Amino acid sequence: MTRAGAFLRDAEGQVVNAAGEFLLDSGGAPILLPPGSVDIAISSDGTMTAAGDPIAQLGIFAPAPGASFEREDGVRFRSDQPFEPLIDGRIMQGQLEGANVSAVGEMTRMIEVQRAYEFSQALKEREDERQRSVVRTLGQAPQ
C-alpha cells in the first residue's frame, strides 16, 4: 500500500506510480489506458474516463479496523491485515496530500525556542557573576 497519489502511464499503457506499482481497479486488477487516450479524468466516486468515456472504476479501500502498519520506505506501508472496500470513499483529482506540519511555522517556533534558551543562559551567567561579586565583596577584610 502507498499513500503516493501521483501517477503516470508506463510503456504498456498501465497507470503506475513513481515506483512502478500499478494503480488498481475495484476488482484489484491493474488499470490499462486505451492507446491514444487523452483528457484522462477521475470523478470523486473513482470513475476514470478518457475524453468522457469510462475506462475503469478505481479501487477505494480502507484498512480493517485495528490494522497495524509497518513503514517500508517513504510513503509505502505494509499490513498483514486485509483491506476492505470503502463504499463512501471520495477521490480528489489533482490534489496531493500535504504535510501535516507547516515548515515556516516550525522554523519560527524553533527560532523562538532558541532565543528563549539563549536568554535563560545569559540570565544564568549574570546571576552567577552577581553571586561571585557578592562573595568577593564579603570576603574582603575590613580596613
Image: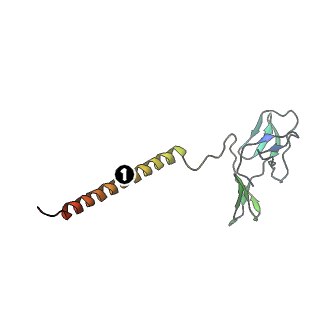
Point 48% across, 49% down: residue: 110
Task: Name the foreground residue: 120 vs 38.
Answer: 120
- The residue positioned farthest toward the bottom in the image shown: 66
Image coords of residue 31 (percent x, y): 84, 46
Q: Secondary structure at mark 1?
A: helix
Colouring scheme, one of rainbow, by chain, secondary structure, one colour: rainbow
Q: Quadrant of residue 14?
A: top right
The relative height of residue 11 versus residue 118 in the rendered view (above or below) is: above
Image coords of residue 113 (percent x, y): 44, 52
Q: Is residue 112 left or right of residue 9?
A: left
Task: Name the foreground residue: 79 vs 58.
Answer: 79
The amino acid type of the residue labelled 1 equals Phe
Q: Is residue 57 left or right of residue 121?
A: right
Image coords of residue 114 (percent x, y): 44, 50
Q: Quadrant of the C terminus?
A: bottom left
Image coords of residue 107 (percent x, y): 50, 46
Q: Quadrant of the N terminus?
A: bottom right
The relative height of residue 126 versus residue 40 in the rendered view (above or below) is: below
Point 26% across, 61% down: residue: 131
Point 68% across, 44% down: residue: 92
Q: How many marks?
A: 1
Q: Residues within 10 Å of mark 1 (few under 14, many from 20)?
A: few
Which residue lies under the disc numbered 1?
A: 119
- The residue positioned farthest toward the left in the image shown: 143
Q: Is residue 7 left or right of residue 101?
A: right
